[in-house]
Image: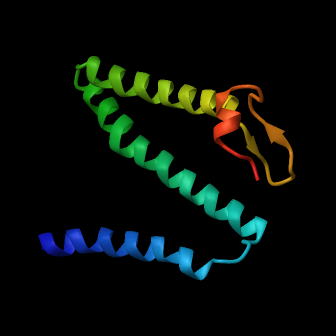
Amino acid sequence: MITLCILIPLLGTTLGSAMVFFLKKEINPRLQKVLLGFASGVMIAASIWSLLQPAINSFEKGDFRMWLYPAIGFIFGVGFMLLLDYLVPHMHMNNEEEGVRKNKLSKTFKCY
């Protein structure tokens, strides 16, 4: 049983990463948006169900700190991602550039 529990995520990760070999050409922008939306939804669901929901259940039992720490971490994580989006120069699919221009990052990350 334990072997099966290890093999299922291993197989899923291996098959997911193998898609790089099948999608060598340009991906349809609509398909790319669908895949990115699905991946972000999975990550948000994982953080809610694995972190926040158990913390809220602990809070209902009377332990306030068990709810506070994950909620603060989640809020700081969202803020950190927004800060990175603002600071790191990047280009959108419509060739619109965004981010801080004149810093060391713009020399490090080249926007294509």
Q: Residue at x 72, y 37 (%)?
A: 89
Of 49 and 42, the residue lying toward us:
42
Up the image or down, 87 lies above or below 95; here it is above
Q: Quadrant of the N terminus?
A: bottom left
Say how the picture is coloured: rainbow
Q: Give the farthest residue toward the bottom.
A: 22
Up the image or down, 68 lies above or below 40; here it is above
Q: Residue at x 42, y 42 (%)?
A: 47
Of 27 and 4, the residue lying toward us:
27
Q: Residue at x 47, y 72 (%)?
A: 16
* Drawn side of residue 16 relative to residue 82, left or right: left
Whole-percent x, y for residue 66 in the image: 27, 24
| Quadrant in the picture for residue 12 | bottom left
| Quadrant in the picture for residue 29 | bottom right
Whole-percent x, y for residue 68 in the image: 35, 20
* Drawn side of residue 3 relative to residue 96, left or right: left
| Quadrant in the picture for residue 62 | top left
Q: Residue at x 21, y 69 (%)?
A: 5
Whole-percent x, y for residue 77 in the image: 49, 30
